[in-house]
């Protein structure tokens, strides 16, 4: 999941978009987004708000959201998720569906309202419920392989690693 987020960040950066990675220096996403994203720690909601005000079409990537549900940035991520369609932004979050998707409110449900998701690995029933689609059952989980769900249409995908991954 982390490399998928880093790929989104790198491609958005290459397209000339302003990118923000919500991550801490001890997390893999921090290293993988060096040079492609403004990196803001989970406790620094003010910096995220300022960056979003300066760039309404901001691209945001955030990893392991379920581990940070009590952080000051989570309510800001929820607001960004609610505004991305209007402002031309993008928010991509990763985490265990069981941790972020079972809540009726929160960043997981805010992002899920966008009706576009990627589920990587072996999907669970909760993954399908979160994205509003029936996902195929698989026996093996291949790294980077999963499903793109857009408006309940399920398409198999393989996430490629970009040049940024060679730094890890």
Image (cartoon, grey):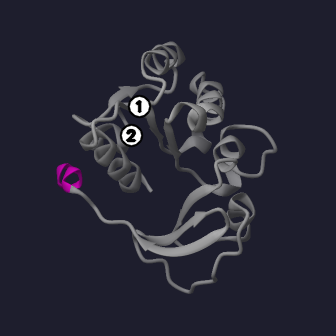
**Label 2: few (<14), some (14–19) or many (≥20) C-alpha neighbours in 10 Å:** few
Q: Residue at x 37, y 66 (%)?
A: 159
Q: Which residue is mark 2?
A: 27
**Label 1: few (<14), some (14–19) or many (≥20) C-alpha neighbours in 10 Å:** some
Q: Position of residue 125 (x, y in %)?
A: 73, 70
Picture disc at residue 8 = none
State how far apart marks 2 and 1 are (Cα). Answer: 6 Å
Q: Position of residue 166 (x, y in %)?
A: 17, 55
Judged from the image, the secondary structure of the residue bearing numbered disc 1 is: loop
| Mark 2–mark 1 CB contact (< 8 Å) | yes
Q: Residue at x 65, y 75 (%)?
A: 135
In this rendering, the answer to whether 48 lies above or below 14 is: above
Q: How many marks?
A: 2
Q: Quadrant of residue 13?
A: top left
Q: Magenta residues, as a range? A: 163-168
Q: Position of residue 124 (x, y in %)?
A: 67, 70
- Residue at the limit of the structure toward the bottom, as seen here: 139
Is 45 displayed left or right of 100 in the figure?
Answer: left
Question: Chief secondary structure of the magenta span?
Answer: helix
Residue 81 counted in the magenta span? no
Between 53 and 109, the one nearer to me in the picture: 53
* Quadrant the N terminus occupies: bottom left
Between 34 and 92, the one nearer to me in the picture: 92
Is 163 displayed left or right of 9 in the figure?
Answer: left
Q: Position of residue 97 (x, y in %)?
A: 66, 56
Q: Quadrant of residue 31?
A: top left
Residue 166 counted in the magenta span? yes
Q: Which residue is mark 1?
A: 24
Judged from the image, the secondary structure of the residue bearing numbered disc 2 is: loop
Between 95 and 117, the one nearer to me in the picture: 117
In this rendering, the answer to whether 63 lies above or below 143 is: above
Q: Residue at x 33, y 43 (%)?
A: 12
């Amino acid at each position: 999941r982390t490399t998928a987020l880093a790929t989104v960040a790198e491609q958005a950066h290459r397209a000339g978009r302003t990118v923000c990675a919500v991550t801490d220096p001890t997390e893999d996403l921090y290293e993988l987004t060096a040079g492609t994203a403004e990196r803001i720690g989970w406790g620094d909601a003010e910096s995220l708000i300022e960056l979003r005000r300066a760039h309404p079409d901001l691209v945001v990537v955030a990893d392991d959201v379920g581990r940070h549900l009590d952080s000051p940035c989570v309510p800001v991520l929820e607001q960004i998720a609610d505004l991305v369609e209007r402002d031309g932004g993008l928010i991509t979050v990763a985490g265990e569906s069981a941790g972020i998707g079972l809540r009726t409110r929160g960043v997981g449900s805010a992002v899920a309202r966008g009706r576009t998701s990627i589920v990587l690995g072996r999907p669970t029933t909760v993954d399908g419920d979160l994205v509003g689609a029936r996902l195929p059952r698989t026996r093996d989980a291949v790294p980077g392989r999963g499903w793109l769900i857009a408006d309940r249409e399920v398409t198999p995908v393989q996430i490629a690693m970009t040049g940024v991954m060679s730094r890890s």
